[in-house]
Image: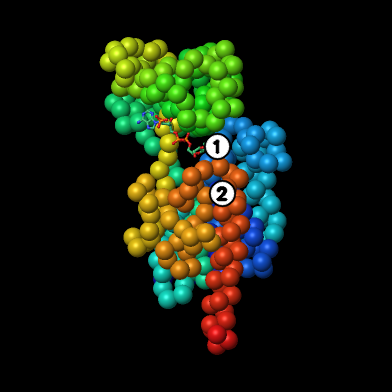
């Protein structure tokens, strides 16, 4: 028989949105738990440097994640290391079943599961994963000190993390499929100003090649000329976007064409009593700033939802 743990608010995922939602729920005197399968902090915990979160001109992602976590815990948010395997509704209860066998039952649930990196899907990627293919510069950058490193992508993550990797690499190639980067202008400029960075324009990676132990080179193709060439590198960091983590959600929850959860302006999903915040939610911008804003709104809306349930139970409406 599974152990059922009762809470007011269950938060699934401990990124900035989830932790901020937890802070607000706990400060509303609600019994709130955040279920996180790794360490809390989400993408920010594995981001090198953050300098666009108001009030922090420059802070390591891991340090900011720790501050978020400690702040939420200080006000009473419980954080449990749990992998949620299924989310279901039973009457007014919103229930998270975990791989551990534990079951968490809440009056409201906030989904803050973020996203996972998109893979390139080229030969060699899976084979050399962990042996020169990485999706996390802060985790793996130091392994490639003084080597030539490639980064794929043209968004904020690729250009920012590519610049970060110059701390370790002798040279960093940013391989982008177009002739214009998508990243914010200030992030682009910092890369252009760094003499270790070279952008390889209009190019895609066709294969990741290596020997028995590690990556040695890439086959890249110029999409304008059709020419292929070899680029000698010791590592390749892939930053070609991410997809939302929605695998555990009920099928009836509405998502957009990219799989991101649709919410109203109160962060409520198509299922009453289930709210969503941060990168998993369909929205234009994916920044820490709006994740914490979403988390705030979701927690306040969840509180109103619980009050309505309580009023209903007390026959006051
Ligand atoms: P993104 O903005 O979706 O950018 C993905 C990049 O990868 C694009 O340049 C795209 O090219 C390229 N790409 C996609 N599929 C590809 C493929 N198969 N082969 C080669 N290139 C491919 O993703 P992201 O950079 O991971 O960022 C995700 C979200 O987090 C964004 O909203 C971003 O603003 C946010 N973020 C913000 C910061 C920050 O503010 N400091 C840092 C990191 C992330 P095209 O440009 O041609 O589409």
Count how many numbered circles sit on residues in the image.
2
Q: From the viewer's perspective, is residue 66 above or below residue 137?
A: below
What is the secondary structure assignment of the residue under circle 1? helix
Which of 261 and 88 lies nearest the eye of the viewer? 261
Residue lying at the far bottom of the rendered structure: 315
Q: Which mark is nearer the camera, 1 or 2?
A: 2
Task: Report x, y in % for residue 208.
Answer: 34, 21
Mark 2 CB near ligand 1 (8 Å cut): no
User: Which quarter of the rendered image does ligand 1 occupy?
Assistant: top left
Can you identify the residue that label 2 sits on? Answer: 291
Query: Which residue lies at the image location 58% right of the left edge and 55% below the top edge?
Result: 295
Q: Which mark is residue 46?
A: 1
Is residue 283 visible in the rendered image? The answer is yes
Q: Quadrant of the N terminus?
A: bottom left
Query: Which residue lies at the image location 46% right of the left edge and 21% below the top edge?
Result: 174
Q: Quadrant of the C terminus?
A: bottom right
């Amino acid at each position: 028989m599974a152990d059922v743990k009762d809470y007011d608010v269950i938060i699934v995922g401990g990124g900035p949105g989830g932790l901020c939602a937890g802070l607000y729920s706990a400060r509303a005197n609600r019994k709130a738990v955040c279920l996180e399968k790794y360490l809390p902090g989400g993408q920010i915990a594995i981001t090198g440097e953050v300098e666009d979160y108001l009030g922090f001109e420059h802070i390591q992602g891991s340090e900011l994640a720790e501050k978020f976590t400690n702040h939420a815990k200080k006000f009473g948010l419980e954080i449990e290391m749990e992998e949620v395997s299924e989310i279901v509704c039973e009457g007014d209860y919103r229930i998270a079943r975990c791989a551990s066998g534990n079951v968490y039952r809440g009056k409201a649930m906030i989904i803050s599961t973020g996203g996972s990196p998109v893979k390139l899907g080229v030969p060699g990627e899976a084979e050399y994963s962990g042996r020169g293919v990485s999706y996390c510069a802060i985790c793996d950058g130091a392994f490639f000190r003084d080597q030539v490193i490639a980064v794929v992508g043209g968004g904020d993550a690729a250009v920012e993390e590519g610049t970060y990797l110059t701390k370790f690499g002798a040279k960093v190639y940013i391989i982008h499929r177009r002739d214009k980067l998508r990243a914010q202008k200030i992030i682009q400029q910092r890369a252009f100003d760094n003499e270790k960075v070279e952008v390889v324009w209009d190019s895609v990676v066709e294969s990741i090649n290596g020997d028995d132990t590690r990556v040695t080179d890439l086959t890249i193709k110029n999409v304008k000329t059709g020419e292929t060439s070899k680029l000698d590198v010791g590592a390749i960091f892939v930053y070609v976007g991410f997809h939302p983590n929605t695998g555990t959600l009920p099928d009836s929850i509405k998502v957009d064409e990219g799989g991101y959860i649709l919410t109203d302006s109160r962060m409520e999903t198509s299922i009453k009593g289930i709210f969503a915040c941060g990168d998993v939610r369909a929205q234009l911008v994916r920044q820490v700033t709006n994740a914490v804003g979403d988390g705030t709104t979701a927690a306040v809306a969840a509180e109103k939802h619980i009050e309505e349930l309580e009023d209903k139970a007390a026959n006051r409406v």
